Amino acid sequence: MPWVFDPHRPLYLQLAEKIEAFILAGTYPAGAKIPSVRDLAKEAAVNPNTMQRALAKLEEDGLVITQRTSGRFVTEDKKEIAKARNRLAQEEAMQFIMKMQKLELKKEEIQAIINKMLGEMKV
Amino acid sequence: MKAVLTAKGLGKDFGRKRVLKNIDLELEKGKIIGLLGPNASGKTTFLKLANGLLTPTAGEIRIAGFAPGPESKKMVSYLPEKTYLNEWMRTEQLVEFFADFYEDFNVDRAHDMLKRLQVDPRDKLKTLSKGTKEKVQLCLVMAREAELYLLDEPIGGVDPAARDFILETIISNYREDSTIVISTHLIADIEKVLDYVIFLKEGEIVLASPVDEIREKEGKSVDTLFREVFKC
């Protein structure tokens, strides 16, 4: 299954986001080996250079570590992963709040909606 | 010397008609490059010049420092716009034929690709459909371990599923030290595999840029930008 992209945004950023999501979801758990650039590029049906750039970004962010001889791994440092999860959650929440504000909802109303929905959720 | 292809002041006239004007270009190693432009923008002429099938009217073109000739042909694997293969040959004979011709031809890889295409090695080329013929030809071209691949409209004549096959073939055969130039006007289909694009308009370069830079700076896809630049 080729991955789906938004052609209007830089591809390497979108690739980095997808792999980050895999890490946060535990598809690639802490310390796990990440497939090779070539295999990942093939799976996503993108240019290996672009995939390389995406992984370089994740390395910069501290989520991925390169071991010279044996390839790339997800960081063992759970704090780094928690940090990334937190950052992503805040971004998503911010998006949501902005949308609610566009609907002219007040702080308390937004809070009430969320609390109500969370209260109704079974899990 | 990292440039695999350079052009300086390159121009080509056909009689009174000017097809390419003053092309200055340096293509880096290890990139997948889209040569994009509408019909009659000079894409095929440029690739023919790079292969020595045409001679420039002005300026020069060099492949890794060599003028197009025997040295450059060893390094360049070219997919022309038209097929030139012998119709009566079986695909296995074509593979042998290419193996005889090119030192860098990888027979196993060719057979492997043809197998994935589900082409019977005993099939004669003339019994295959137009689209399958094009795919066979691409397999032969990509089975060479060349430094530079020049592909003239590799996805022009095939259906979308075959396009995916072709792009996958290109990606999986691409090596870090090789360079691939793909000419096409079907941009949306290939833009996600490109590193770099060159827009040709009426024989001139109007844009040469890394693809993600276009998305970053303009907030547009290459396809959208192309439609703007070439609006009729």
Image: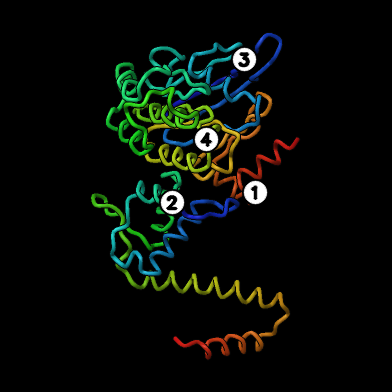
User: In the rendered image, which residue does mark 4 sit on?
Assistant: B158
Labels 4 and 3 share a subunit: yes
Disc 4 to disc 1, C-alpha distance: 31 Å
Tell which circle, 4 or 1, labels the residue nearer the N-terminal end: 4
Disc 4 to disc 3, C-alpha distance: 30 Å
Nearest-to-viewer mark from 1 and 2: 2
User: In the rendered image, which residue does mark 3 sit on?
Assistant: B12
Secondary structure under tag 4 reads: loop
Residue B95 position, x and y percent, is: 32, 23
User: In the rendered image, which residue does mark 1 sit on?
Assistant: B218
* Label 2 Cα neighbours within 10 Å, binned few <14 / some 14-19 / many ≥20: some
Chain to which mark 4 belongs? B
Instruction: Look at 38% across and 22% down and name the residue there.
Output: B75
* Image quadrant where one finds the C terminus of chain B: top right
Tell which circle, 4 or 3, labels the residue nearer the N-terminal end: 3
Tell which circle, 3 or 1, labels the residue nearer the N-terminal end: 3
User: In the rendered image, which residue does mark 2 sit on?
Assistant: A44
Disc 1 to disc 2, C-alpha distance: 24 Å
Nearest-to-viewer mark from 2 and 4: 4
Amino acid bearing label 3? Lys
Determine contact: label 2, label 3, CB under 8 Å.
no
Secondary structure under tag 1 reads: helix
Residue B230, quarter of the rendered image: top right
